[in-house]
Amino acid sequence: MQLGIIGLGRMGGNIARRLMKNGHTTVVYDRAPQAVQALVAEGSIGAGDLADLVSKLTPPRAVWVMLPAGAITQGTIDQLSRLMSPGDVIIDGGNTNWKDDVRRGKELAAKGLDYVDVGTSGGVWGLERGYCMMIGGKPETITRLDPIFATLAPGIGNVPRTPGRDKHDPRAEQGYIHAGPCGAGHFVKMIHNGIEYGLMQAYAEGFDILRSAANEGRAEGEKFDFNMADIAEVWRRGSVVTSWLLDLTATALAADEELSEYSGFVEDSGEGRWTIEAAIDQAVPAEVLTAALYTRFRSRQEHTYAEKILSAMRKGFGGHVEPKNSVKA
Amino acid sequence: MQLGIIGLGRMGGNIARRLMKNGHTTVVYDRAPQAVQALVAEGSIGAGDLADLVSKLTPPRAVWVMLPAGAITQGTIDQLSRLMSPGDVIIDGGNTNWKDDVRRGKELAAKGLDYVDVGTSGGVWGLERGYCMMIGGKPETITRLDPIFATLAPGIGNVPRTPGRDKHDPRAEQGYIHAGPCGAGHFVKMIHNGIEYGLMQAYAEGFDILRSAANEGRAEGEKFDFNMADIAEVWRRGSVVTSWLLDLTATALAADEELSEYSGFVEDSGEGRWTIEAAIDQAVPAEVLTAALYTRFRSRQEHTYAEKILSAMRKGFGGHVEPKNSVKA
Amino acid sequence: MQLGIIGLGRMGGNIARRLMKNGHTTVVYDRAPQAVQALVAEGSIGAGDLADLVSKLTPPRAVWVMLPAGAITQGTIDQLSRLMSPGDVIIDGGNTNWKDDVRRGKELAAKGLDYVDVGTSGGVWGLERGYCMMIGGKPETITRLDPIFATLAPGIGNVPRTPGRDKHDPRAEQGYIHAGPCGAGHFVKMIHNGIEYGLMQAYAEGFDILRSAANEGRAEGEKFDFNMADIAEVWRRGSVVTSWLLDLTATALAADEELSEYSGFVEDSGEGRWTIEAAIDQAVPAEVLTAALYTRFRSRQEHTYAEKILSAMRKGFGGHVEPKNSVKA
Amino acid sequence: MQLGIIGLGRMGGNIARRLMKNGHTTVVYDRAPQAVQALVAEGSIGAGDLADLVSKLTPPRAVWVMLPAGAITQGTIDQLSRLMSPGDVIIDGGNTNWKDDVRRGKELAAKGLDYVDVGTSGGVWGLERGYCMMIGGKPETITRLDPIFATLAPGIGNVPRTPGRDKHDPRAEQGYIHAGPCGAGHFVKMIHNGIEYGLMQAYAEGFDILRSAANEGRAEGEKFDFNMADIAEVWRRGSVVTSWLLDLTATALAADEELSEYSGFVEDSGEGRWTIEAAIDQAVPAEVLTAALYTRFRSRQEHTYAEKILSAMRKGFGGHVEPKNSVKA
């Protein structure tokens, strides 16, 4: 079928490509003209602005917005909502906060427009592996767009089937679900990312302990000097901790056990934070997901004010003077 | 080659089977005669006691002890060490604390015996998938036993090769590594289990938040009512959180989203605790692995004394009286 | 000076009493007539409704609202804002979210009304000890109300002066501060409560470990059987952990070491949650304050869904079946 | 009474002074002769070595060892045990691990010597405020040494009595307790320090959030710019978070709100770590105490290997390249 796509970055561009490779028609727009040209060269219909894009689509239209969450996405949707007609649907495939989806869904419904939020996982691997999609919106709209989702999804592939799936929604094992009403898609994607943070931190701590293995008082020949690359590799087969994140870790460690290209400064995105806010709203203890987020906060500072407060107290009660050089070599 | 196996439970029995299926000879002993008989029926040579087992092996002997860690394993190894001869090797495949391995390695070396510690992952799936093994001991001993390890390991299977592995030890991608001297095998396995706890808890918290999704103030038709089974399933394909633990979760949820057969009481084993001790010994912050352990501690109590202390303080400063019924329905 | 007070519960009633005891005039209202009558018997001027209260005050009026945060407080302030005149001031002494203060300050300013937010600590002890107050609003308004704050505050008392305070604002050592513009008072109070949770949890965990002291393998006469009441008491003098919260704990433990009147169910209020939201907004790692909050969440459930997920995974990979009885006796 | 004191550092020297000021006789030794001379000038009897010290004491002797925990203390006690006679008592007032006390108590008992472990809190303030002491050992020995403990303890002072204390051991409100058999004193002191870490971290996080208060999108005149010194001060009077640690914080902040003399590098001592080991041994969840310890571990590194693992994964799945400059200015 036909899909308008706005935003042709890493994600949007590959979504267009995967759709075209499977016989769909795409009408594309990006504020960078060369991004549009590149896709046109691969078979897309290019648009010069939003109005042009809308005019090149046949009603009922479907436009997938794949832009940075926040003001940019909101502004684009606002503009689209003035250009599109009742019965058209706007799809937000970015990393929007689910509360914005709930609000937007209502606002657009008031204009007769449909709104669908799609949490999209797959990163740079999506073109090849397909995109895992968690979708929120009205059932009939999701059904109408099914050809798009079915194409973008990874499909059942060579992943073994889960016993007992026959009685459940078949879309899940194709790699996409209709999670619920507006906001539900991004909510599930948010939790996905929260879990991702926790999983990553679990591996990270484990490798850190391995690397720091204490050898104090051990004789030569009895010391531990673990090979990080081999450990990551061996766990990929037959162990309980096998995962795609471990595969990626094994790749990075096979290239350089020291990870010397990485500074240790770790960004976080909105979903990790919103996950904790949801946990707190719902009074769910989420120690691991929260600790994983805080580690990232801490990684971006040389020292916290909190740490200085500790040293000030220690001096106060014990006369302890901490070393002036701030960190270990 | 020939291997003595002591302890024919879930793990030991299947290890014998996997070896025999691949042409090795096994001499087996278990204090339960019927366990020995069962293996004999499948091709093993049975032994009536430890002395009998040792006498039925050709020097230099190799005996794999697959028993509960602690006193039972230690007692068995003590006995074996009196029955075996210089050049023989004792393999501990159980969940022993690596510090015991270090000590034992020295004690047995003093008697001319070799000692090898094998951290074995694979659980009930090992017979079919093979066992992921992390091995500690002297290089020449590990090399001599290689036919055993190569057979027990999962092999490269259909897991995609990690780019850049060619320059590394080929055993890792077969599913076993020589991690270092005595104790190194169980140290790496210990960290494996520590990570396992963290991964499990990350998923668990995520599903808990999904399940508790707040619907306060939401209109009918806008409420979230997530399908846990479909969410676990969809993440198995193309998402960042794909893992074997997720596969198992998807299986459990496909059978019963309520998980009503589980009480919520969660055991922990030594490795999770020892991982935290190692972290503390080495001054490595391990928030996530620790939080995962503490969750299990907490799951096994109705209320902690700590919680009563909190209520007592709250009454003291604010006159707050907590509800007498202890938990939410 | 003259102050209107709305809400004559534990806090509001005692605020009126402390003011009257020190020569101020109070005009009081509560929806429960007997609460008004009780204060009138002690010297207050009673009001029958908000309009009556406003009419009995001389402009420029000052009205202190001491009600449950949220809809009740908001509704009362909305009503007051229609009854009061430019130059009057509304004081919110409750546990309002600072974001509501910021909004309200602007809304009331548009009507010519002043707004002051006061975070008030002191609980049931305030009448006797005085109230520690953290105040947000315009400097000139805070100055005008100073007689009220100075009376309600604990004063310098017998707490030793902090060295070097002479160069700082003298109000702080009297027990009240002007923390900043609207919202600043409740922000500081919010953090105060966040810290309170952390402090409480630190003591609670310590006493829990003491009480659970492991005696495994210890001979009779070598076992630990700690006296909680004596330990709390001894730390009150000369130790580093001396505090008012410890005083309260010592009182509770002196009465009953078992704390058998407490179920272990622990409530939390908004401030603890908002503190974590502020930490996350500002990317400040706040492990301890968060863990303290999560403990309370957990205390109110028999088991979490998260724990069942763990058991389901454990059964999946290891065949582990957890005990069916959910908790230890 | 008469007491031998070995180790005349900050703690040992002041213990001698406080005893002499109250009429006790001290025989002192330190490997630094000038430390001995200084005490002799204040009235102590000096000793040239351990044998000399023992010879100058009248049986049954009591010797207080106040040295760094570990090898130095152990070596000194070993030497003393060869010089002393049945009925004599060795007191370890340092920061010894309680497990060493248990072992030592037995070893010394075999030689007819008594052993007493004293957890001593009070730091540099002990001379003036007295020392809070948690004591382990045999009841009759503790009773014999009571004059020493009663003198060193802070006494009831001007701290208000806890209601209901009359029916309890009167020593606790003097500031010392007999906690149980050998090891019990240091166990309670260990938990004291574990709690101390948690309390400190709670304040530290709170002040960190205050200092980082987000002002994004706030108009001039509406921004928060909290005064740390005033906030610490105001909480000292009438608030729930009043404590001695807060007093010390207020002092440090009154001198310099920036705490610019502190780097943020924070040491930890054994007790904090042992507390967590005890928690894990006893399966007590101790989230807050553990998080407080881990913060210190983290404060001493520029970046952890764990953080680099995170960045490597992020690059692997999302192509994310973290900023090369490692931390925020």
Image (cartoon, coloured by chain):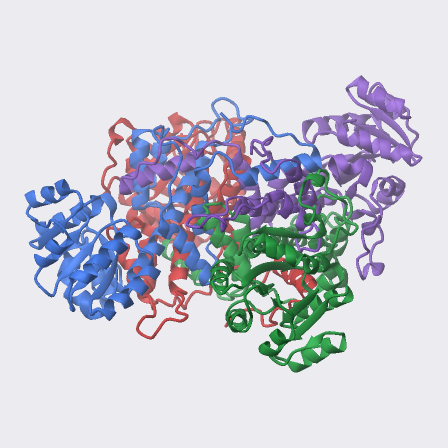
Chain colours: A blue, B red, C green, D purple
Report the side of D83 relative to C100 (left or right).
right
Residue D213 x, y percent position in the rendering: 50, 47
Residue C46 x, y percent position in the rendering: 68, 78
Quadrant location, the C terminus of chain C: bottom right
Report the side of B134 relative to B49 (left or right).
left
Quadrant location, the N terminus of chain C: bottom right
Depth check: A127 or B58 in front? A127
Does residue B93 show up?
no
Query: Taking A100 as reference, is B12 above or below it?
Result: above
Query: Taking A182 as reference, is A258 above or below it?
Result: above
Q: Residue at x 31, y 46 (%)?
A: A243
Query: Taking C109 as reference, is D24 above or below it?
Result: above
Residue A308 x, y percent position in the rendering: 58, 37
Q: Residue at x 51, y 72 (%)?
A: C82
Residue A315 x, y percent position in the rendering: 67, 34
Does residue C93 show up?
yes
Q: Report how many numbered discs are placed on residues in the image.
A: 0
Depth check: C234 or C277 in front? C277
User: Could you say which quadrant of the image residue D238 lies in?
Assistant: bottom right
Depth check: C241 or C195 in front? C195
Q: Which residue is drawn at 50% across and 57% down?
A: C274
